[in-house]
Amino acid sequence: MIRDTVAPRPDWQSRVEARGLIWHSTDGKPYWDEGTFYRFDRIEVDLIEGATAELYRLFLEAGQAVIDDPKALAVFGIPPDWHDAIRDAWRDEPPALNFGRFDLGYRGDGPPKLFEFNCDTPTSLLEASVIQWDWKQDVLPNTDQFNSLHQRLVGKWADLRSLVPDRQVHFAHVADAVGEDTVTVAYLRDTAEEAGLKTKAIAIDDIGWDRQQGLFVDLDEQVMTTIFKLYPWEWLTDEQFGRNLLESLDRTIWMEPVWKMIWSNKAILPVLWSMFPDHPNLLPASYSPLGGDVVTKPALSREGANVVIHRDATVIAASSGAYQDSHTIYQALYDLPQTAPGCYPVIGSWIVDGAPAGMGIREDGLITGNMARFVPHVIG
């Protein structure tokens, strides 16, 4: 894994905007940083791809263990009213795109290590698929890339097509000011439409409730039978229409399904470690303090919020956020490589329905936050 530099394309802004990446810069600095890239050899990529498939297998087993344990969902902080719905969805396997991003630490001197699994509201998807592929084709066309994301997403939507009523999916998300969620949902709509589905966008706050039918409707009063939402399940369960959602689960297809509340919760990390101690792709994790150097993170935090890194019993990095009240998870510290002053890369390895699908790299300080830079990669 070698960090390298190359001249950005002169018209890179217009090129990535044409492909849908409107959120490519923040405060005058590039979020999409194509002046930097990482070069991997095939052995390293095979190692990352293999770890991704293995971690998915571990999550399947850990998810089943949580489902089988009558007390586990309470430990995860999931409201009791939702426990049966989660167990039913896990058993019945409603239609799901079933995609996500494993965030991994990797130094090139050992196996990749899991930090967490972003599988409910994962972003940086467009960048990892078509944006970095286009860059490679333009700048380093004789190299390869670990990247089959677009094809796998389209293929999975095609598999789901016959299960979607009227072959239409509503795509809901927060109307975020910076456009990150908007970009991700717009790209997913493109992949669904390429697979032959009809799509319709709606802001999450604009979803209505038809009391007579007991179903959700859009602004045109059209019933929403299949809904993809880039919005956390734990927020939905806590909001005013959460009860309506729970009562209509048997009449509405939600992507991703409610059982994703298990995998997207960092409380799964101690479950994994207890089931697979000393697994080469896992870090020690616990619900109670660990000895040695450790990272503390809220079970339900997002975008690197409220993370604290302790080394030699001293705090060396901490991030702010609004998740102080979430249950604390303790995970052993993994030292990321510092590939440039202040730059610590985290690998996001994507999976679509159990199949490794590619990777993206984000660079930040010791804690990877929402303003981390995305940098492309090549093989060779």
Image (cartoon, rainbow, N blue to C red):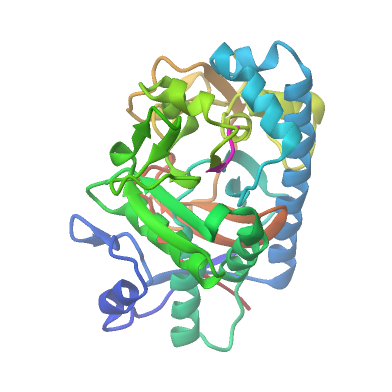
Q: Nearer the viewer, residue 208 or 81?
A: 208
Q: Nearer the viewer, residue 270 or 259?
A: 259
Farthest residue to the bottom: give it. Answer: 142
Q: Quadrant of residue 375?
A: bottom left
In the displayed structure, 90 sits above or below 53; it is: above
- Spot occupied by residue 373 in the image (x, y as percentages of width and height): 37, 56
In the displayed structure image, the side of residue 92 where residue 134 appears, left or right: left
- Spot occupied by residue 334 in the image (x, y as percentages of width and height): 60, 38
Q: Residue at x 59, y 41 (%)?
A: 117
In the displayed structure, 234 sits above or below 365; it is: above
Q: Quadrant of the C terminus?
A: bottom right
Say whether residue 266 is visible: yes
Say whether residue 110 is visible: no
Q: Residue at x 35, y 21 (%)?
A: 240
Magenta residues (range): 254-258
- Spot occupied by residue 232 in the image (x, y as percentages of width and height): 45, 35
- Spot occupied by residue 255 in the image (x, y as percentages of width and height): 54, 45
380 drawn magenta: no
